Amino acid sequence: MSEIRRIGILTGGGDAPGLNAVIRAVTKSAILDHGWSVIGFRNGFEGCITGEFEELNLSSVRGILPRGGTILGASNRCNPFSFQNTSAGEDAPRDHSDDVIQRFQDLEIDAVVVIGGDGTMSISNELSRKGVQVIGIPKTIDNDVRGTKVTFGFDTAVTTATEAIDKLHTTAESHHRVMIVELMGRTAGWITLYAGVAGGADIILIPELPFHMDSIKDKIERRARLGSYFTIIAIAEGAQPVDGRAIYETIGDEWYQKRFGGIGSWLEHELSQQLEQEVRSVVLGHLQRGGEPTARDRALGTMMGTYAVDLLAEGETNRMVSISRDPMGQSSTDMTSVPLVVATRGPRHVPISHPLIRSARVMDVCVGEPWHAHGKES
């Protein structure tokens, strides 16, 4: 790899708390440690196509560490290999990847730091095949990017979800209701599992464990018999009944991903038909993406950003920054990297053997299994 003088940076996919911490870390370490210049592309890969970019300097990133969102903007609907540039009058999607590469060459960008989830990493991997020097930084509140044990944004999302569950307890208990909170997690239940346990949910339903309606109903009725006339259910948007299918809110254009949503409302309707108790549901939605990042996400984003620059300085490209072990409960975090292609091999699911699932079962939390699944009633 030739000597680096200028790098690009962009934030693809959905927003996540901690993105600004990463942008700040990449920019400051590139400028202060290596003397490189930094070009920030607006709205993910879309800015590479439309020509929306700016040079980032130390003033650009001053004061952004505690801010949520991303100062560069994000887009989860721009795949440069299939994108309709309406600003240029295009009436159909086409392959813009060569335009993106030409943009990098015109700006004399030697390498690009791309921050995003598995979809963004897949695009980055394809660009690397066409000669672009890329370092990926995994980002998603869902914590489901393969190749890393944790992503920044997850801790803040779990904290937000836990606070919501805490607040639901008082209204549920006051009105003797069953309260359902639908949380993000299309194919992986990391947020729901962690927030459900931390918030003391009585029932936790995740995509990795299709649930039995009888088990949920029995758990609610057993609580009532024991004098607990309310129940809190935490459910991931991608959870589904064992004899049913995932619930979608809407389906976008064919080149976009299906949008999960509605499982909480569906479960509310089903339980209302079977229980005498009042059942209500709430969708936390994009609140989980917003707000100030936690201290952990600020620190993690900073470490990932500086490590990405270190990799480039060492001549390492076409790799993704990775945390080799879950830092929860540990005194340090192991930074490493994996080939970009690793992140393209599907989402990282919650293992059924995960110790937090076992802890939930021991604590008499129903995870949707039949009562005999782990030796006692759920």
Image: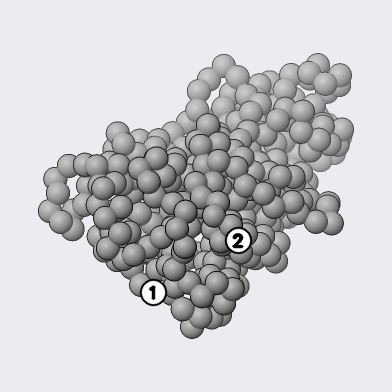
For the residue pair 5 and 100, the one nearer the viewer reads as 5
Q: Is residue 199 left or right of residue 287?
A: right
Which part of the image, by quadrant, shows the C terminus? Answer: top right
Q: Secondary structure at mark 2?
A: helix
| Proximity of marks 2 and 1: CB atoms separated by less than 8 Å | no
Residue at the image position 34 percent from the left and 39 percent from the top: 256
Location of residue 108 by image quarter? bottom left
The percent position of residue 309, horizontal first and vertical second, equals 56, 62
Location of residue 298 by image quarter? bottom right
Q: Is residue 343 left or right of residue 86?
A: right
The percent position of residue 370, horizontal first and vertical second, equals 74, 19
Instruction: Give, as a three-letter code, the residue at label 2.
Output: Asp
How many numbered callouts? Answer: 2
Residue at the image position 46 percent from the left and 37 percent from the top: 260
The percent position of residue 66, horizontal first and vertical second, equals 60, 73
For the residue pair 64 and 283, the one nearer the viewer reads as 64
Residue at the image position 61 percent from the left and 35 percent from the top: 348
Residue, disc 1: 55
The Cα atoms of the two marked residues, 2 and 1, are separated by 20 Å
Residue, disc 2: 310
Residue at the image position 37 percent from the left and 62 percent from the top: 109
Mark 2, residues whose alpha carbon is within 10 Å: few (<14), some, or many (≥20)?
some
For marks 2 and 1, the one nearer the N-term is 1
Q: Secondary structure at mark 1?
A: strand
